[in-house]
Amino acid sequence: MIRWSEFLMPYETAVEELKNKFKGIRNEYRKNNEHSPIEFVVGRVKQIPSIIEKARKLGLTEENLDQMDDIGGLRIICQFEDDIYKVVDMVRIRDGMDLEIVLEKHYIKEVKDSGYRSYHIIIKYPIFTIEGLKFVFLEIQIRTMAMNFWATVEHSLRYKYKEALPEHVAEKLRSTAHEVYLLDKEMQEIRDEIISAQNLFMHKSNTISQILGNLTDMERMGMLDEATRFRDAFEKINARKGRDMEEDLEALSLAIKQSMNIENGSLKEELQQLEEKRTGNIL
Ligand code: 0O2
Ligand code: 0O2
């Protein structure tokens, strides 16, 4: 007769340990004020009746019950689909270190008949018990919040119904799964657009500060006419909006650099000499 609390103890420890490891990563991102690919982590050890039911289905006995690969389970929830693959990489990087990857199931590429989407990784995880080192199989499910919403509701409906779902209900669920897929896709697109707008903004700010810095240097070097001409051009471009404005800023920045280099050789050297003269380092 199986002693359940003894049998399940290493799974509880393993789930708790791994949960904390991934929560640690999430907290690190948050401390750095960066977007965390991990939104939240939950974990569970399968209920005993579910283990018995699944063991029966798989033909497992007490002796080889530890071959069941999802007695311990970790669920990592992400905001965006892209994040899922970042988390997958986080798990892969640990392969051979504190865990061993046994199997990956890409249910996002190969959607299950039900409409279920998630990325599963089965791992072998070492646990140090009072009896020594033990290995347990764990299932890590990685999914977006939208995928999680669908899977949670579908799971509870399926569980409530007990029997096989009528085909028209199953079809409705598949169709809602598709809506969830579209929602994820749209959210990902919005995020990509925001990131590219942010990058563009950063790039534009850098170009502007480079132009203004170079114009100041030009004035310090006595190239007053050119500096005034370039400053007028800059103000005209800067008053405009739109994509071609960025291109013109780039062109202006390049023209300023070229003008400084052609007329004055190495700008750095000139500035250094001026600086040294000013501070009296050159007699
Ligand atoms: P925070 O700052 O709230 O995110 P525990 O051992 O108590 O830390 P346990 O026992 O697994 O964790 O608790 P639980 O209730 O399963 O939830 C684990 C974490 O996931 C908790 O966050 C929950 O707030 C978070 N969580 C659960 N469901 C959701 C959800 O639908 N949305 C979001 N955003 N978070 C959820 P923490 O780790 O306590 O910290
Ligand atoms: P729980 O703990 O109640 O979530 P099998 O479990 O027999 O279907 P296998 O190969 O053992 O097949 O596992 P699979 O299909 O790779 O994934 C197992 C787990 O993924 C399930 O655990 C679910 O959590 C989740 N899952 C898989 N398919 C679906 C689905 O169609 N809908 C939902 N909501 N979840 C799914 P369990 O065993 O259901 O247990």
Image (tube, rainbow, N blue to C red):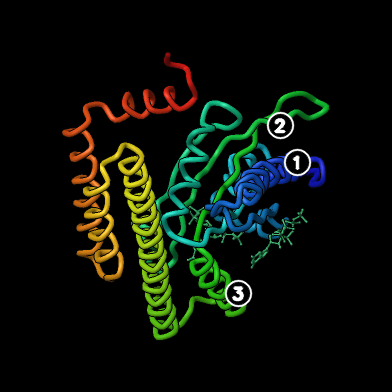
Circle 3 packing at 10 Å, graded few (<14), some (14-19), many (20+), is: few
Q: Residue at x 78, y 42 (%)?
A: 9
The spot of residue 232 in percent (x, y) is 25, 60
Real-space Cα separation, disc 2 to disc 3, in angstroms: 32 Å
Cβ atoms at labels 2 and 3 below 8 Å apart: no
Residue 127 shows which numbered tag?
A: 2
Per the image, the residue denoted by label 1 is 13
Real-space Cα separation, disc 1 to disc 2, in angstroms: 8 Å
Q: Residue at x 51, y 31 (%)?
A: 95
Between 218 and 114, the one nearer to me in the picture: 218
- Mark with earlier residue (2, 3): 2
The spot of residue 146 in percent (x, y) is 50, 69
Q: Amino acid at mark 1?
A: Thr
- Mark with earlier residue (1, 2): 1
Real-space Cα separation, disc 3 to disc 1, in angstroms: 27 Å
Residue 156 visible, this angle:
yes
In the rendered image of this protein, does residue 193 appear above or below residue 136?
below
The spot of residue 103 in percent (x, y) is 46, 40
Cβ atoms at labels 1 and 2 below 8 Å apart: yes
Q: Amino acid at mark 2?
A: Ile
